Image (cartoon, rainbow, N blue to C red):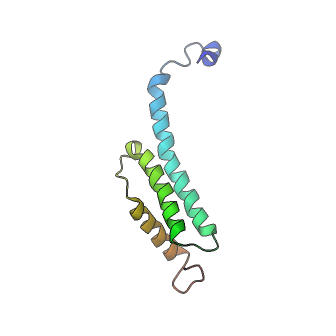
Amino acid sequence: MAAVESVVPGGSAGWEEDLPKLLAFKRAQSVFTDVIRTALLLVEEPTVDGGLFVHAGGKIQKVLSAATEPLEIEVPTVEDVTASLEKWYYMRYAPIGSKRRP
């Protein structure tokens, strides 16, 4: 705070009130980034299996848990997240008969 105050006196006023809002925003923003990043990793894998979906589902569920308050959501179970990822993946990237299906 001293650095800010030395350049702009009063510039750090209200930081205690603003910090929780900023952190909540970053947790909410992280959900979108992490879901997209995780989905892209699934698509880039040459082969996928149930373990990969469970790992990815756990990562997404953890991020959703951290953003529960700012997004005002109920967090799905890891099983529900994993099932959604599998459904999305197989519908979009591995139709029946595809070499990408386990």
Q: In this rendering, is residue 57 above or below 16?
A: below
Say left or right for 28 vs 77: right
Q: In this rendering, is residue 33 above or below 45?
A: above
For image coordinates 57% across by 83% down, the residue present is 98
The picture places residue 71, in percent across and down from the top left corner, at: 40, 46
Say left or right for 83 vs 2: left
Question: Foreground: 83 or 51?
Answer: 51
Quarter of the image for the N terminus: give it. Answer: top right
Which residue is the extreme one toward the front?
51
Picture mark count: 0
Question: Foreground: 9 or 75?
Answer: 75
Q: Quadrant of residue 39?
A: bottom right
For image coordinates 50% across by 71% down, the residue present is 50
For image coordinates 54% across by 66% down, the residue present is 52
The picture places residue 68, in percent across and down from the top left corner, at: 39, 46
The picture places residue 73, in percent across and down from the top left corner, at: 36, 50
Which residue is the extreme one toward the bottom?
97
The picture places residue 96, in percent across and down from the top left corner, at: 51, 84
Quarter of the image for the C terminus: give it. Answer: bottom right
For image coordinates 57% across by 72% down, the residue present is 48
Q: In this rendering, is residue 87 above or below 98?
A: above
Question: Foreground: 11 or 59?
Answer: 59
